[in-house]
Amino acid sequence: MKAYKNFIGGRWISSNSKETFDSLDPATEVSIGKFQDSNGLDVELAVEAAEKSFQEWSDFPAPKRAEFLFRIRDLLIENKERLARLEVKEMGKVYKEALGDVQEAIDIFEYMAGEGRRLFGFTTPSELKNKFCATIRRPIGIVALITPWNFPIAIPSWKLAPALICGNSVILKPSSDTPLCAIELVKILNEAGIPKGVVNLITGSGNTVGTSLVTHQKIHAVSFTGSVETGKFITKNAGLKKIGLELGGKNAIIIMEDANLELALEGVLWGAFGTTGQRCTAASRIIIHETVAKKFENMLINSTKKLRLGSGLSKTTDIGPLINRKAVEKSDYYTNLGLKEGAKLLIGGKPLSSKGFFYQPTIFTNVNHNMRIAQEEIFGPVLSIIKIKNIDEAIEVCNNIKQGLSSSIYTENMQYAFKAINKIDSGITYINSSTIGAEVHLPFGGVKETGNGTREAGWTGIEEFSEIKTIYLDYSDKLQKAQGITD
Ligand code: NAP
């Protein structure tokens, strides 16, 4: 069994702990490799390496840093199919979705490379004569990137690309469920010539490596994507670091009485069961007008029956496995809870007994919006159908959750659509499309417990990884005081 190492200061090295852990193929439960179970000493080494490299990297003009990012983009294109196959092996999603994940990485490196020739600041007039005012962007310093497993190449890339173009040095801690995808990504960054120590990677547990990064005095910022629970831990323990949080969701698709039901059906299947329901933007609630609910339920049951579970590498598979045993248990826990709460199970509701972490696509109807299955993020293929009488009730139910990431409405009515745009509490709203499908040049993130107000990707991705400096340049040759002070 191959043992993979940490990448620190441009070298692949073993952890001080001398311990390793396995990453499993979720479709077969077979280990795909051993990984360093790192500790605080490894974090110290990575911080030292990042500190050493920071000056040189941040001194490169941003358009020169961009040249590295364009090379990374090209190498990702060359390696797209290989990386996608690896992602299926390690994370379980179906091959065509894995190709999409790598494409997101390609897109974000390309977009952020373009930022190398922007990184815009502002100029604005001074209130005084012969004085010039402007802002410029500066890197933050050493940034810790802590990532989940569900987009094991795209999410690290969504952080690496803006962090690098802004001139930071980084330490990446990937999810312990998908360390190999991160290692293969970092190999590509290394091959593209990123100077030693600018990108460091440490594998190991969130409790040990994650906590050491979050609390380390010399780390200036933490960019985190993962659960609300870990996000709250980071907020409490990171001190005065700059923090970016992209957390969970309990996203809804609203289907109104005038909706194109065939179109909505496609969107619901893709939103609820794509990536086996393990997207932060997955649709786990359908809020549907009571007059079309029965018809839509029948359509949905018929289509769901046809979905085939299996290895993501097989061309006939629609739904891959869940990430691990705990995830199967979680989906099963919520299925049993839904039954206890009085919801009606329409289809599914069982793990598959064969090898691998498979769970049937599961649909509940007659769900009350206050039930826990309609409130809590399950992160599996479990969907709740809630019936409503009008658009105002639909929006009220949609908003009656703690998080606010994505949302969607199917309707032909402009008034309904604009009510959804203006009134739904979420970072993203789709009209006549599913809750998923983010594009890298637009801001991504959510409100309420989904985060702390940062937005990744697009122009806002730059905000997270840079500091603003305000410049006052006085060429009057005398001391001029602002606010009208004369003496
Ligand atoms: P998680 O358990 O919070 O883990 C995410 C990362 O944090 C992993 O690398 C984990 O390490 C690390 N971690 C765990 N405890 C830590 C601690 N005390 N200090 C620092 N780091 C720690 O989340 P997950 O299960 O991987 O991911 C699923 C969640 O991510 C869902 O809630 C989903 O909605 C959310 N998500 C959000 C977005 C978004 O953009 N809003 C995107 C994707 C996913 P280990 O793996 O070693 O535990």
Image (spheres, rainbow, N blue to C red):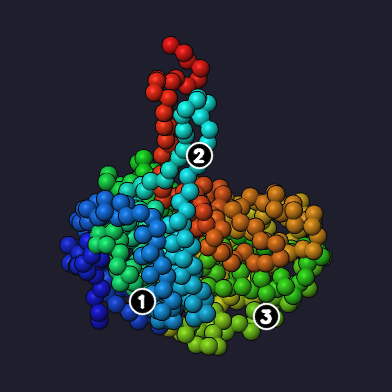
Viewer-proximal residue, 199 or 178?
199
- From mark 2 to mark 1, how far is it between C-alphas? 53 Å
Task: Report whether 255 appears left or right of 9.
Answer: right
Task: Report whether 339 appears left or right of 71.
Answer: right
| Residue position marked by numbered label 3 in the rendering | 303
Task: Report whether 161 appears left or right of 254.
Answer: left
The residue at the point 55 percent across, 52 percent down is 446
| Residue position marked by numbered label 2 in the rendering | 123
| Residue position marked by numbered label 1 in the rendering | 24
- Numbered circle sitting on residue 330: none
Task: Report if the CB atoms under discs 3 and 2 are less than 8 Å apart.
Answer: no
- Quadrant of the image containing the N terminus: bottom left
Q: Earlier in the sequence, mark 3 or mark 1?
A: 1
- From mark 3 to mark 1, how far is it between C-alphas? 31 Å
The amino acid at mark 3 is Ser
Picture layout, residue 475 above or below residue 381: above
Q: Image quadrant of residue 208?
A: bottom left
The amino acid at mark 1 is Leu
The residue at the point 40 percent across, 20 percent down is 479
Whether residue 456 is visible: no
Q: How many marks?
A: 3
In what element is the residue under mark 3?
helix
Q: Earlier in the sequence, mark 3 or mark 2?
A: 2
In what element is the residue under mark 2?
strand
Neighbour tally class for label 3: few under 14, some 14-19, many 20 plus, Cα within 10 Å: few
Viewer-proximal residue, 4 or 11?
11
Tell me the mark number nearer the camera, choosing from 3 and 2. 2
The residue at the point 67 percent across, 55 percent down is 398
Measuring from the top left, give residue 213's x and y in whole percent: 30, 52
- Quadrant of the image containing the C terminus: top left
The amino acid at mark 2 is Thr
In what element is the residue under mark 1?
strand
